[in-house]
Image (cartoon, rainbow, N blue to C red):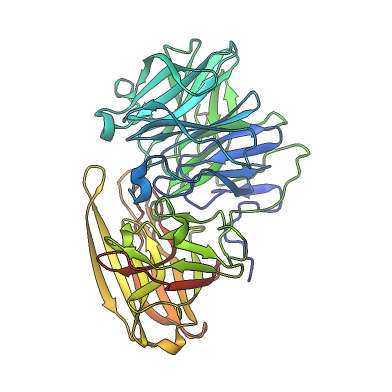
Amino acid sequence: MKSNSIWNADLGNGSYRNPILYADYSDPDAIRVGEDYFMIASSFCNAPGLPLLHSRDLVNWKVVNYIINEIPEDRYKEPIHGCGVWAPAIRYHEGTYFACFPMPDEGIYMSTATDPFGTWSKPVNIRPGAGWIDPCPFWDDDGKAYLVAGVAKSRIGYKSVLHIVEMRPDGMGLIGEEVKIFDGNENDQETIEGPKMYKKNGWYYIFAPAGGVKVGWQTVLRSRNVYGPYEYKVVMCQGDSAVNGPHQGAWVDTITGENWFLHFQDVYAAGRITHLQPMSWHEDWPIIGIAKDGKDYGEPVMEYKKPDVGNAAVSVCEPKTSDDFTGNQLGLQWQWNANPRKEWYELTGSSLKLNAVRMEKVYGEMPNLLLQKWPAPEFVCITKLDLSHLDDGEEAGVISMGICYGLLTFRRDDEHLQPRLIKGEQKYGKILVEAVEESAQELPEIDWKQAGKIYVKYTVKKTGTQDLNSREKGFPLELVTFEYSTDGSNYSKAGEMNAVPGRWVGVKNGVFCCYEGSEDKESSGYAVIEYVEYDRTL
């Protein structure tokens, strides 16, 4: 299998380009421990959850682990789009790594590890109940610990407020009463959220974006007292850059004393992609990005010199995409649409066997969709399937998953394969999907003898921009095209669709195997995924 670079930010000349990750690692938080950087991100209803990425230079990253194998609470055996694991924080304190994450309907959870590459502890709900989001633990010089957090209006009835509460030093519970430390509704900082807490030169700092994901800015609060009062300053705006709403992230330093800031940019269909900005200090206030024309705030950069990480050994890398399924575990690029079950799949040593699972609702609500993030602004993904082991009435194929989704599926119908292009759209209420509309287009039948070799080509191509808000400079407009072949060379076009992101997540693409029916059946039918290959060549 070819090993192609899909998106790498390292320019190879001592500089890098933004975004450093053109993939939906949203709400990133990061730390440095020695020469190692670790970053985590939101994962919502997909499992395993809380991806852990590693880097030595803040530019080259790869996924090395997941904090949780399953999302806590039983209801996540089904996909609950937009719920689950929201913006997390990662910290290192006295030899222990802490991953703190919110589930807006269930509470604030904490998981720990002494080896970040190993198994993390079962998450503990340290603040049960709905409403609090975006938590960040903080340990002070006197040994006391605290938790700062925002709120979700959809769960608690108000927004733009930050709270702090004392935390047990072991991170496994809260102490005393919460204190409101900032109200963005009173300080022209509406929708302030995602707080990350630090201390420098006797100042307590809380980095928190405001103004909304797509059109906001980065704000920093500071105080000499952990409980405030806090003054605030805007430290990064979009300005004349192409980076709309530079949002929520993490301040990290290098072993040589440089300061950097990781944050995301919402680019609509591809989700919230990760940027790296230089950071400096002026009169005990940070400036993120580059200040222009004497301004006291920064604007994002698109290219810059790489961080000086001293003598750290650095390898050029990026998160994996292509897969030939020759390992004994699923690659870390894959996540399920909900908490997985062992009976869904098997790795044979040379391929992935997907067992047919009963579809209880509609395609987009199947928990057994195996998905991965879009890895670049434009790409081609070719999936080779062997469908000769399907039983009558069973089907398998490739899906593009968002609020508006599309899939190319092949159903066995006696001695034929019936290709169909399915398009669906989720209709949301205040929080959850309330209805889904699906339509199907039948394509020419394929002789069953050709079922051992089915190739699906999934192409994402930018076709322009779209203006979703007058304050924005326009989002990419991507066209998704489905094609299929029985020889890997001659492809027939099945259809196309404009890409629309999911609920707080970018579009994902992947594979599935299922059957329709009123009840579970004993079946030995399955699909074989021989490989999935990504390429930037269009």
In the image, residue 151 sits, relative to residue 480, either above or below, namely: above
Q: Nearer the viewer, residue 437 or 78?
A: 78
Decide if residue 516 is in sight here. Answer: yes
> If the image is split into quadrants, where does the N terminus sit?
bottom right
> In the image, what residue occupies the spot 27% across and 33% down?
155
Q: Nearer the viewer, residue 10 or 472?
A: 10
> In the image, what residue occupies the spot 36% across and 78% down?
494
> In the image, what residue occupies the spot 68% across and 42% down?
56
Q: Position of residue 238 (x, y in %)?
A: 44, 39
Q: Nearer the viewer, residue 446 or 211?
A: 446
> In the image, what residue occupies the spot 36% across and 43% down?
74
Q: Position of residue 377 (x, y in %)?
A: 48, 59
In the image, residue 373 sits, relative to residue 451, either above or below, namely: above
Q: Quadrant of residue 328?
A: bottom right
Decide if residue 208 is in sight here. Answer: no
Q: Position of residue 344 (x, y in %)?
A: 44, 61
